[in-house]
Image (cartoon, rainbow, N blue to C red):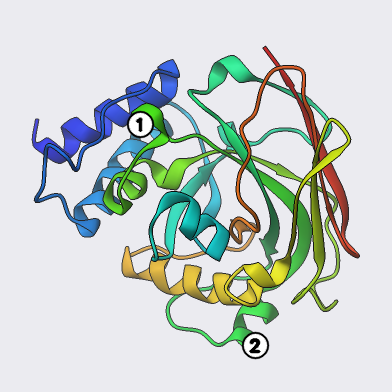
Amino acid sequence: MDRLAKYAEMLDSAQREATATPQITPVDTAFTVEEAYQVQKLSVDRRLSRGERRIGVKMGLTSRAKMLQVGVDEVAWGRLTDAMLVEEGSALSRARYVHPRVEPEVAFLMKSPLVGKVTAAAALAAVEAIAPAMEIIDSRYENFKFALEDVIADNTSSSGLVIGSWHDPRIDFSNLGVILEIDGEVVQVGSTAAILGHPIRSLVAAARLVAEAGEQINAGDIVMAGGITAAPNLAPGQTVRTTVQNLGAVMFQVEA
């Protein structure tokens, strides 16, 4: 087994067993971003071989808050599968994760394929609907510590997604107020403008980056636009709710 396949197996096992694993980069100083995306694909392919189904992509590190939180300055992307879906209003098990956090987002539902370098207008024309959403992020690395290459290999920390009601994408979603509450207390406040200045830019970037990997965004795919605020930790017993101006709310609970 070559070293990239070994890393993919390590991260896949960490995800399945909800057990932290050491970083790659401190040991393998030659590990590159390109190799990290190869590891991500190999790791997710292991999940697909077990019966999971690809449902879209997620964008990461798209807000200044997230870049500051993890100490990087580059946009990244990861893959979504049906096993990552958390039903809106339901409870998720904290035991399924290593050290989960939550971030408010918006999600796009695609009505037509999107591939390569596209304009914002072309990207918007390919969108069926937009919804308030939350992503469960859970780095599989010890102490939630990683370099850019590590996080990309780890599917950009993506572990779950919760989607609210879908809305007409023709509304202006460039600068909508966003509130994240835990147990009724406001813990984060932001704006959709935190996503690269406008969430549609995240979709444009997604089309380009996915194409660089030889893939495309398909009709029916979900695209998570990226975190809007810093991501607080999740603990059993919490009720978590995100409200996005003009798009409504999305919520879930955390059980042990």
Give the residue at x 80% y 27%. Answer: 90
The N terminus: image quadrant = top left
Residue type of the residue flagged with mark 1:
Tyr
User: Which of the two discs, 2 and 1, labels the residue nearer the N terminus?
Assistant: 2
Residue type of the residue flagged with mark 2:
Ala
Residue 220 in view, yes or no: yes
User: Measured along the vertical axis of the image, is residue 91 above or below residue 250?
Assistant: above
Residue 50: horizontal and vertical position, in percent? 42, 26
Q: Nearer the viewer, mark 2 or mark 1?
A: 1
Mark 2, other Cα within 10 Å: few <14 / some 14–19 / many ≥20: few
Q: Quadrant of residue 169?
A: bottom right
Residue 213: horizontal and vertical position, in percent? 32, 63
Q: Quadrant of residue 26?
A: top left
Task: Indicate the secondary structure of the residue bearing disc 1.
Answer: loop
Label annotation for residue 141: 1
Query: Do residues under tags 2 and 1 come within 8 Å of each other at their CB atoms?
Result: no
Give the residue at x 79% y 58%. Answer: 178
| Viewer-nearest residue: 253 or 4 | 253
Give the residue at mark 2: 121
| Viewer-nearest residue: 228 or 95 | 228
| Left or right placement of residue 161 versus residue 96 in this view | right
Give the residue at x 78% y 54%. Answer: 132
What is the CA distance from the residue labelled 2 to the residue labelled 1?
A: 38 Å
